[in-house]
C-alpha cells in the first residue's frame, strides 16, 4: 500500500496538468487511501476519561452544629485516548490516568466500561489498563517504529478536546528526540500530524494502518496544536507492555556505564567530532559493558546502528531495551572505530537507587574539570544526567553541577557521594553543597 500511495503522490502533479478529470481521479485515490487507514484503525482506538471521588458536605449543617449530611460524587478529572492491544488490555499514557479514582473506557461503538490499572511507568509515560467485556475487541496492528523514516506519512487518531475518533494526517518530522523534557526515558518520534489535548495515549499509524507510536505530548506556546507533536515509538512501548503484563513491574536494561556529553574540548583531545557521540566516563566492574571490553574515554557513536549524540538518548535506549537482549555499540577508541557487543541485564539495586534519585553522577576527571573551569586536581562528583521529572530536577540540580558535599560530609568522588546518600535514613533530606559555573550553592535533595 505504501508504494502505491507514494506513486499516487508522484503522479499527482502530472495528472492534474494533463486533464482536470484525471486530476480529480488522482485526488479521489489519495482520499481513499486515508479513508482506508481510518477505517482500519478507528475500531481499535478508545476514549479514556478519569474522575476523582469528592465528598460534598452541607455547609448549613456545619454552621448550625448539626450532624453533617454529605454525598459522594465523582468529579471529572481529565480525558485522553487509548489503544486496544490484546485480550481486553488498553495501552495509554501514564499522565492520562495518574491520580484517578475512576477510569472509564469508551469503545468505538459507544459502550462504556470501567477499567483497572494493570501497571504504569512514570518515567516512560506509559500505562496498561484492563477492561472486561464479552464482546470481541479489535486489537490494533503493531508496526515497527525502527523502520520508519523522516518524511514518512503518518496518521494520528484520538480524542482531542473530547472530539472522539478524530483523524489527522502529517509526516514524521524527526526521530530520536530525547531533549524535550517530557519523560525521563524517551526516544520520541516527532510529527506534524495534529495532536491536541485528549490525543494523549492514542495511536500514530503508518500507511498500512499499523501503530508505530503512542501520541504523548505537544510543544506549544498556546496550549494547542502548533505543528510539533511527539509519540513514544511502539518498539519502546512493547518492552514496557511485556513487563507490565507479566509482573506489573518494569525491568530496566542495564549496561553499567556512566556517561557524559562530549564537549568540544574533550572531543579535540580524543580525536572525536564535537557533538558526535557520547563519552564513557566510567565502566562499572563486572557489568555488561566491562565484559564487552568498554573503557573510560571511549566515545559511543552508535547504538544498534542508530547514531547517539547525547547521553540522555543513549540512557533512554539502554533502559528501554529488553533485558537479555544483545546490543551492538560502535565506539571510537584511540581515533579508531571499533564494534563491541554486550548483553543487557536487569539494573542492580545501586542503579535502581540512582534512578530513584533521578540523576547520574561520575567522578570528576581532569578533562571535565578543565571544561567546567575548575583548577587542576579538583575533586568531586559531577552530575552527568538529570531526569526531567525526578527528585534531582525538583531540587534544582543540573547536568554539569559538581557535588562537593552531602550534609557535612566532603565528597571527592562518585563513590563518596553514593556512600553518603546510602548512609542517610529513608525519608531524610540531604543538603548538597554544589559548584555551578564557578559559584557555590546549596540544594536540598528529598530522599522520600
Image (tube, rainbow, N blue to C red):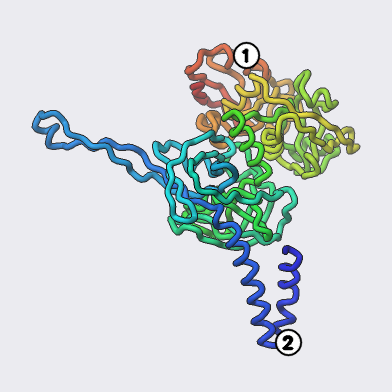
Image quadrant in which the N terminus is located: bottom right
| Label drawn at residue 419 | 1
* Nearer to us in this view, 395 or 405: 395
Horizontal side of residue 190 vs 50, given as left or right? right
State which tag comes first along the sequence, 2 or 1: 2
Q: Residue at x 71, y 72 (%)?
A: 9
* Nearer to us in this view, 93 or 1: 1
Task: State the count of labels.
Answer: 2
- Quadrant position of residue 382: top right
Characterize the local packing of mark 2: few (<14), some (14-19) or many (20 or more) Cα atoms within 10 angstroms: few
Horizontal side of residue 109 vs 294, given as left or right? left
Q: Position of residue 106 (x, y in %)?
A: 45, 50
Mark 2: secondary structure? helix
Characterize the local packing of mark 1: few (<14), some (14-19) or many (20 or more) Cα atoms within 10 angstroms: few
Q: Position of residue 166 (x, y in %)?
A: 51, 60
- Quadrant position of residue 366: top right
| Label drawn at residue 5 | none
Q: Position of residue 37 (x, y in %)?
A: 62, 62
Q: Residue at x 69, y 30 (%)?
A: 253
Whether residue 445 is visible: yes
Q: Please identify, in this view, whether the residue under mark 2 or under mark 1 is nearer the observer.
A: 2
* Nearer to us in this view, 115 or 418: 115
Query: Label 1 near label 2: C-beta < 8 Å?
Result: no
- Quadrant position of residue 358: top right
The image shows residue 400, relative to residue 140, as above or below, that is above
- The single residue placed furthest to the front in the displayed view is 134
Horizontal side of residue 68 vs 174, given as left or right? left
Q: CA distance from mark 2 to mark 1?
A: 76 Å
The image shows residue 403, relative to residue 125, as above or below, that is above
Q: Position of residue 120 (x, y in %)?
A: 54, 35
Whether residue 380 is visible: no
User: In this figure, which residue is indicated by the disc labeled 2?
Assistant: 18
Amino acid at each position: 500500500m505504501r508504494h502505491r500511495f507514494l506513486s499516487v503522490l508522484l503522479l499527482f502533479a502530472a495528472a492534474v496538468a494533463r486533464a482536470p478529470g484525471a486530476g480529480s481521479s488522482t485526488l479521489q485515490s489519495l482520499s481513499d487511501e486515508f479513508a482506508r487507514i481510518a477505517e482500519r484503525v478507528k475500531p481499535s482506538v478508545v476514549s479514556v476519561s478519569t474522575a476523582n471521588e469528592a465528598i460534598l458536605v452541607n455547609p448549613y449543617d456545619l454552621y448550625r452544629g448539626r450532624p453533617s449530611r454529605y454525598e459522594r460524587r465523582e468529579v471529572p478529572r481529565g480525558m485522553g485516548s487509548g489503544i486496544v492491544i490484546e485480550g481486553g488490555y488498553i495501552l495509554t499514557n501514564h499522565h492520562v490516568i495518574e491520580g484517578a479514582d475512576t477510569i472509564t473506557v469508551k469503545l468505538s461503538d459507544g459502550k462504556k466500561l470501567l477499567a483497572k490499572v494493570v501497571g504504569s511507568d512514570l518515567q516512560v509515560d506509559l500505562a496498561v489498563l484492563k477492561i472486561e467485556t464479552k464482546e470481541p475487541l479489535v486489537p490494533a496492528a503493531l508496526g515497527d517504529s525502527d523502520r520508519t523514516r523522516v518524511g514518512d506519512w503518518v496518521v494520528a487518531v484520538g480524542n482531542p478536546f473530547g472530539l472522539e475518533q478524530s483523524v489527522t494526517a502529517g509526516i514524521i518530522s524527526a526521530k530520536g528526540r530525547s531533549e524535550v523534557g517530557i519523560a525521563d526515558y524517551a526516544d520520541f518520534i516527532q510529527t506534524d500530524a495534529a495532536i491536541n489535548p485528549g490525543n494523549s495515549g492514542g495511536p500514530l499509524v503508518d500507511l498500512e494502518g499499523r501503530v508505530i507510536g503512542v501520541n504523548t505530548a505537544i510543544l506549544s506556546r498556546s496550549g494547542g496544536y502548533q505543528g510539533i507533536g511527539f509519540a513514544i515509538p511502539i518498539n519502546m512501548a512493547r518492552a514496557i507492555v511485556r513487563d507490565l503484563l507479566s509482573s506489573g513491574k518494569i525491568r530496566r536494561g542495564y549496561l553499567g556505564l556512566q556517561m557524559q556529553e562530549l564537549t568540544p574540548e574533550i572531543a579535540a583531545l580524543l580525536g572525536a567530532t564535537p557533538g558526535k557521540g557520547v563519552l564513557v566516563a566510567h565502566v562499572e566492574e563486572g557489568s555488561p559493558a566491562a565484559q564487552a571490553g568498554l573503557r573510560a574515554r571511549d566515545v559511543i557513536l552508535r547504538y544498534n546502528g542508530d547514531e547517539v549524540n547525547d547521553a540522555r538518548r543513549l540512557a533512554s535506549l539502554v533502559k528501554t531495551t529488553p533485558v537479555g537482549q544483545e546490543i551492538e555499540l560502535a565506539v571510537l577508541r584511540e581515533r579508531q572505530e571499533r564494534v563491541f557487543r554486550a548483553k543487557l541485564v536487569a539494573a542492580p539495586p545501586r542503579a535502581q537507587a540512582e534512578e530513584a534519585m533521578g540523576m547520574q553522577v561520575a567522578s570528576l576527571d581532569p578533562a571535565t574539570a578543565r571544561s567546567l573551569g575548575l583548577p587542576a586536581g579538583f575533586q568531586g562528583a559531577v552530575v552527568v544526567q538529570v531526569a526531567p521529572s525526578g527528585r534531582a530536577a525538583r531540587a534544582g540540580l543540573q547536568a554539569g553541577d559538581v557535588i562537593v558535599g552531602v550534609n557535612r560530609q566532603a565528597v571527592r568522588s562518585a563513590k563518596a557521594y553514593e556512600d553518603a546518600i546510602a548512609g542517610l535514613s529513608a525519608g531524610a533530606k540531604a543538603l548538597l553543597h554544589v559548584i555551578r559555573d564557578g559559584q557555590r550553592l546549596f540544594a536540598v535533595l528529598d530522599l522520600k
